[in-house]
Image (cartoon, rainbow, N blue to C red):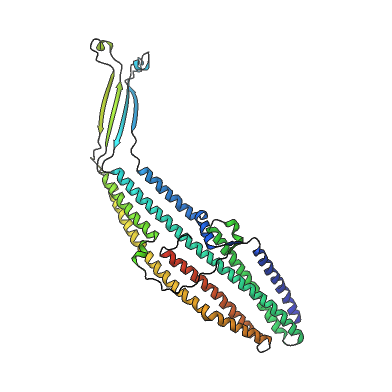
Amino acid sequence: MRNFSKRVQRPVAALAMLAVCLAAAAQDNVIGLTLRDAEQQLATGNRDVRLARRALEGAQANTVSAGARPNPNLSLGVSQINPQVGVGGGPYRDKTVDSSVRLDQLIERGDKRELRIAQARRSEAAASQDYADVLRQQLLALRSAYYDLAFAQDKSAISRDNIALFERTIEAAELRYKAGDIAAADVSRLRVDALRAQNDARAAEADRRRAQLALAYLIGAEAKGAVLRAIDPWPAPDSVELPRVTDEMIDRRPDVRAARSRVDAAAGARDLARSLRTRDVTVGLSYDHYPVNPGFAQGSGAGTGNTYGLFVSVPLFARYTYEGEIQRAESDYGAALDSLEKTRAQARSELNRTTSDLQAASERLARYDGSLLAEARKASDSAEYAYKNGAIGVMDLLDARRTLRAIQIDAAAARNDYAKALSAWRAGIGSEEPR
């Protein structure tokens, strides 16, 4: 049994040294990050937010394009070129060819330009609300990742405290064993549980590392992920009764506002498609120069070789009157209405769910903070005292420690669940903005 104890003691000491080294390395070059700092970095470093901002900029550019008036068309041409006799000598105006200059301008009718501008502005409003919704979702993901990191840090701290407690207990147990107060099997049980505590600490460190990387990705700071540390305290539980979900809460959410703006934009697109049946007019003005017959030009002053023309062009709806465009616009409008209804239903369901989750998380946290955690600590302290005085065996001591550690981790998980539920509820009602 003594040989077994020595074999077990070596890996325990090695793992303890490894845990100490990992903890010391983790404290080097640590970047303490508050939630406010993380939110500010999210606005510039998050890739989804940047993409949504680009989409908004594109919608703003479409509004500028929609307000543009049609440009005139300038046409230059020559005709009456005889390849056999050539164009003759002399300056350009004396060549034996006809030359013309023509300017055409499209005149839009049916308020097409105004309808385009109105539709583009509504689409821009929808893109703006899309940007706000992406920011809302990414803020929620950021807060969830931030609290996951805080939870992982708490688990790691609990595991380190557990390791330190086992080290002290093993030292005391070895002294008692040498004095003949306890059996060698009790020392071995303590060492086995110390090994399990080392494994738990290593798993907690791995969870902390994953939480750091997840948070770093959201703020675009992957290179610094290994040294990030959440330093904000857990949000205090609020005993205020949660308000009932109302239509006003739903309507002020950015995703619902974006869906409503798309309905307005689809209505504008439908009006624009109908306006295609109003004929546009193209007005043209031409100037023609042609060589003058000298005999025709003598004496009368006529035949100057310059003429002018005025043209009006109107499309004839002989075969097609934009039925396809109008039908498609009607279909898009109906789809926008269905999308709005779906978005509102999803928003209501999400609000009801987050409200229920927040209430449950608040009650669960209150039980841990109110009695569970305190009672578990009291029971563990009593077991420690009793074991030191020989009143209980090592198995009772280990059971008390395992119970305390499990409740400590459960309490930390309850704080994490409450913090994330609170953030989700606030994001759901549209009250969570970057601080």
Q: Quadrant of the N terminus?
A: bottom right
Front residue of 319/99: it is: 99
Given residues 104 and 30, the one toward you in this image is 30
User: Residue at 67% of width from left, 66% of height from top?
Assistant: 24
The residue located at (67%, 77%) in the rendering is 166
Query: Residue 291 at what x, y percent from top left?
Result: 31, 16
Task: Please report the residue visible at 59 percent of the width from the left and 66 percent of the height from the top.
Answer: 208
* Image coords of residue 404 (percent x, y): 59, 79
Residue extending farthest bottom: 391
Q: Quadrant of residue 259?
A: bottom left
From where the camera sits, is residue 345 visible?
Answer: no
Q: Position of residue 417 (x, y in %)?
A: 50, 71
State whether residue 174 appears in this view: yes
Residue 384, compared with residue 125, is above or below; it is: below
Q: Front-most of 147 and 342?
A: 147
Q: Is residue 433 left or right of residue 219?
A: left
The image quadrant that residue 15 belongs to is bottom right
Residue 377 falls left or right of residue 292 = right
**Looking at the image, is 317 positioned above or below residue 347?**
above
Q: Where 228 sits versus 325, above or below? A: below
Total marks shown come to 0
Q: Nearer the viewer, residue 181 or 358?
A: 358
Q: Residue at x 46, y 58 (%)?
A: 135
Residue 355 image offset from top left, x and y in percent:
42, 70
